[in-house]
Image: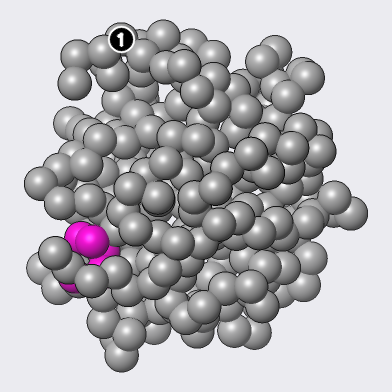
Amino acid sequence: MTPLASDTAMVLAAGMGKRMRPLTATQPKPMVRVAGKPLVDHTLDRLAEAGIARAVVNVHYLAEHLEAHLRERTAPAITISDERDALLETGGGLIRAQEQLPDPFFCLNSDNIWLDGPQNCFADLSRLWDAERMDALLLLVPHKSAHNFAGLGDFHLDAAGLVSRRKPHRIAPFIFSGIQLVAKRLLRDAPEGAFSTNVLWNRAIEEGRLFGLPFTGQWFEVGTPEAIRPTEEALKNV
């Protein structure tokens, strides 16, 4: 089996979950249950299964609910990156947590569910990882494998695996899965306060250091209440 490039993952769980309302009126989005368990447990269970020993989870909205739940888990070992004072978005969240993160580290959203292909996605990312050439390696999903997704796509990949963005008013063949492997070099000279990881990705694209890997499994976007039932029905058939 491919050795993992990192034993640590950052799990982004601090958002307000506005698209998931009204389910997030009294609970943070990572605590919304799908197929019998909270979304965050789907993510953390997959990390544990892959052998990733440690997860750094950021918290902001209704943080005490999420923290209380996470204290009940034994694997992976969890540490908290506290954003109660201000929501920092994805990029700012990484900067807040960077002292807790090794180089490189996996990074995941807490609201996607996926079924791996022949090998787990963390092993796939690790197999392709090249620290000399890459600031980040994104796991990208082709449209046919993206369930509950109705957008135009996010990225193109060239023959070398380099990522470029979708052109305006065009369709791109790949959707970002929410999963990536990140070098701490990506975080250098970052803006202060709240900002999107897109700022860091754009620089990496310009420098030829943002790469992508097509995902060989099935991926479910669970961003709204309407996505829960079809996701549960699909999971019954696996």
**Residue 178 position within the rendered picture, expressed as x and y whole percent measured from the top left:** 43, 48
Is 126 colored magenta in this rendering? yes
| 218 w.r.t. 237: above or below | below
Is residue 214 visible in the rendered image? The answer is yes
Q: Position of residue 164 (x, y in %)?
A: 31, 63
Please, which residue is most extreme toward the bottom here?
132
- Badge 1 crowding class, 10 Å Cα cut-off, few under 14, some 14 to 19, many 20 or more, is few
- Asked whether residue 155 is in view, the answer is no
Q: Amino acid at mark 1?
A: Glu
Residue 66 pos. (x, y %): 71, 37
Q: Residue at x 50, y 84 (%)?
A: 185
- Quarter of the image where the C terminus is located: top left
Does 81 appear in magenta? no
Q: Main secondary structure of the magenta part?
A: helix
Q: Nearer the viewer, residue 159 or 10?
A: 10
Q: Nearer the viewer, residue 226 or 66?
A: 66
The figure's colour scheme reads: one colour
Residue at x 68% of width, y 44% of height: 71
Residue named by callout 1: 233
Is 134 situated above or below 91?
below
Q: Residue at x 67, y 35 (%)?
A: 69
Magenta-highlighted residues: 123-127
Total numbered labels: 1
Q: Residue at x 10, y 46 (%)?
A: 118
Numbered disc 1: secondary structure: helix
- As drawn, is 224 to the left or to the right of 152? right
Quarter-of-image position of residue 95: bottom right
Q: Is residue 138 above or below residue 146?
A: below
Q: Position of residue 176 (x, y in %)?
A: 37, 48
- Name the quadrant of the N terminus: bottom left
Horizontal side, residue 29 vs residue 133: left or right: right
Task: Residue lying at the far right in this picture: please name it.
Answer: 85
